[in-house]
Amino acid sequence: MKQQIKVLVVDDSALVRQTLIELLSSDPGIEVIGAAGDPYAAVERMKEIVPDVITLDVEMPRMDGLTFLRKIMAQHPIPVIICSTLTEQGAETTLKALEYGAVEIIQKPKVGTKKFFEESRIRICDAVKAAASAKLRVYTPVTVRPKLTADAVIPSMSHQPKAMVKTTEKVVVVGASTGGTEALRILLEALPMDCPAIAVVQHMPENFTAAFSKRLDGICRITVREARDGDTMLRGQALIAPGNRHMLLKRSGARYYVEIKDGPLVSRHRPSVDVLFRSAARYAGANTVGVIMTGMGDDGAKGMREMFDAGAHTVAQDEQSCVVFGMPNEAIKLGGVRKVMPLGNLAGEILRMG
């Protein structure tokens, strides 16, 4: 029997602590070993038992979450998930936590509909498993509800016309999850101003994608911003799917653009890489360069196979350079990947094919 993932919840709100405990305890692969109202109480608990994963609030009394995170990473590295509210100001602070070594960002659970609670449970439990996997911990995958495919947002191509094959431009579609924020920075920072148009799905809560895009835009030669519905795909620009919304690639004549839409979780995510990749297979076909990067789970694997079948050039980040090799590995196993290469080589491959 596989060992449960031991989680310590650190948050100054008693309601948030209780909600997280309830959500995490619903998964038989996860054990909540304790909850603390601030980092000092967390340290005392960690003297008794060391967790596999910590969920950590950013704003707390006595010691803030960022300071505690730096101390953890310097003294006893443990996978940390930042649990934050959805505010623009909080997004800027929380993104700094990724630089300090946090593995994931999740939205603080709140009282809402049954659907919201169920989606929160999926996202939070999966984030814990991803964090544990990033440090080579043993985790037990659990199916808490049927996992939807991209059919829920965009119908399959089996009864649809093939994508048009003549166009003046190549387009690049990229999918990433755990470890992707840093991997995307490395990739996009290496691209020149005249690179092909890029559409990116990075699993991240809403509001955080706007702050993430703004940060990348400030350090990259290309333009990087959060996508808006109807945005044209332009050379020298990367569009990041907004958190909690699906992004599809569409085509009107010779112009590629993106559609931003609501919908259910697909492959346990919104935005979903599978949704973006399927739309690219349909509307760009062989004009697509598809890249799947570090991340937990299998989101993007089926969509990459569909791109492969449509004649796209498909590339996966290799295991050595991934924080979590889940998504690329699943795409490789489905036979949808033409090349596997290190993170540092992906930009060159995009330019070679674009």
Image (tube, helix red, strand yellow):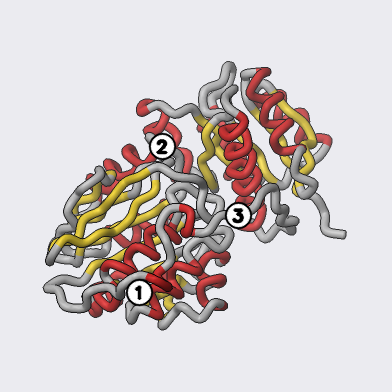
35 and 114: which is toward the camera: 114
Q: Nearer the viewer, mark 2 or mark 1?
A: 2
**Mark toward the start of the polypeptide (1 vs 3):** 3
Q: Nearer the viewer, mark 3 or mark 2?
A: 3
Q: Position of residue 32 (x, y in %)?
A: 77, 37
Disc 3/disc 2 C-alpha distance (Å): 21 Å
Three-letter amino acid code at disc 2?
Glu
Q: Residues within 10 Å of mark 1 (few under 14, many from 20)?
A: few
| Circle 2: element type | loop
Answer above or below: position of 336 versus 274: below
Disc 2/disc 1 C-alpha distance (Å): 30 Å
Q: Nearer the viewer, mark 1 or mark 3?
A: 3
Q: Position of residue 112 (x, y in %)?
A: 57, 24
Which corner quadrant holds the C terminus? bottom left
Q: Residue at x 35, y 44 (%)?
A: 261
Q: Residues within 10 Å of mark 2 (few under 14, many from 20)?
A: many
- Residue 244 visible in the picture: yes
Which residue is tagged 1? 345
User: Looking at the image, do the residues carrying marks 2 and 1 touch, with CB atoms under 8 Å apart?
Assistant: no
**Mark toward the start of the polypeptide (3 vs 2):** 3
Q: Position of residue 103 (x, y in %)?
A: 54, 48
Which residue is tagged 2? 206
Q: Residue at x 40, y 80 (%)?
A: 309
User: Which of the 4 quarters of the picture holds residue 69?
Assistant: top right
Which residue is tagged 3? 147
Disc 1/disc 3 C-alpha distance (Å): 33 Å
Three-letter amino acid code at disc 1?
Asn
Q: Residue at x 46, y 49 (%)?
A: 203
User: Which of the 4 quarters of the picture holds residue 342?
Assistant: bottom left
Most extreme residue toward the right, as rendered? 1
